[in-house]
Amino acid sequence: MKKIITYSLLAAIMLLSACQKTDNPKIPTLTRVPVPSLLKDASGTETIVVSDIANFVGKVSVDVFFKTDTPPQKMDLVIIKNGDKSSVKVLQANITTYPTVVSFTGPQLIALFGTVETCDFFTVGVNITTQSGTIYEAFPAVGNPYGAGVSGQYGGVQTSLTYNTKVEYEPAVYSGNFIVVSDEFGDFVAGTTVVLTTINATQFSFLQPAVENPIPIKVTIDPVSLKVSIVKQKIGDYFLWEPSYTNPTVLTLSSNPDNRVIPCTQTVSIYLDYAVDQGSFGENLLVLKKQE
């Protein structure tokens, strides 16, 4: 016990003797930077609908949060796509009046970034030029533009805004070669290719590989909920791995939430409920993903 106390006192002495005023680095001069406040104007569009992008109009109110603080020399409203800070585009430069509402359109986004697809998102912020001429970027290549927790202070300061695309079903995506991710039933081999064929705007079909005289399985998609369904249908004459299992059929149970397409990953997930004349096999999950 004495040794512990002795060592502790010695450590304290060493610490005190090591801490000299002249050894401390000088505290850097602090720069006062105006805090921006961005809000989505209620008269603008909240979400980007890819199929109707021509009619998208986003409206951003650009303001300073502290009204009595020294204002910036100017602000430039800028935007990036999918979090990519390497290609910052300017929506409006030289904003000097606060608040100012800036509008931007779907065609403008296409002109700046090219094709806009389901699951793309856009983030807007402001580059600040102080009265001294120093520029503080909204999306610096390294680090963050503001300290941690700033957005949660003073009742919530919004220094950037995100505009998401509405996740929509795109028939063109669910056509062509898909790779088998997994199949609980075991007839579709993981890593092999399954061809999806478009029937119409809300239906596609594919073949079960382990039946004699396969009949295309028709899948219906609800474009709003993105759920998929299969009404009971015959898929062949018998299973190749057991010819005595005749007239195989398949359907989906609407209660299963995993019967859906996932456009952001170009995946389809279906619980296939197989049955034959001799009985039922129950639900088995099949997951397919678009071939890159």
Image: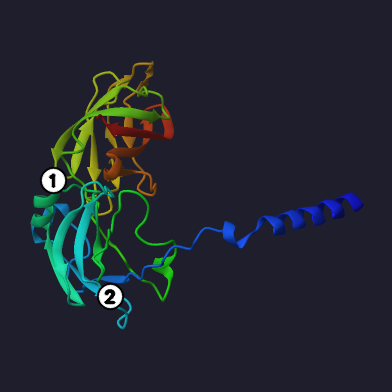
Which mark is nearer the camera, 1 or 2?
2
Q: Between 266 and 247, which is closer to the camera in this rendering?
A: 266
C-alpha span from label 1 to label 2? 33 Å
Q: Secondary structure at mark 1?
A: loop
Amino acid type at mark 1: Thr
Percent coordinates x, y for residue 196 in the rendering = 21, 31
Task: Left or right? Give the position of 128 relative to 243.
Answer: left
Percent coordinates x, y for residue 24 in the rendering = 56, 59
Amino acid type at mark 2: Val
Give the residue at x 31% y 83%: 68
Q: Between 186 and 182, which is closer to the camera in this rendering?
A: 182
Q: Disc 2 designates what residue?
A: 64
Q: Tell which circle, 1 or 2, labels the residue nearer the N-terminal end.
A: 2
Residue at the bottom extreme, as displayed: 68
Q: Quadrant of the rendered structure where residue 273 is?
A: top left
Q: Quadrant of the rendered structure where residue 277 is?
A: top left
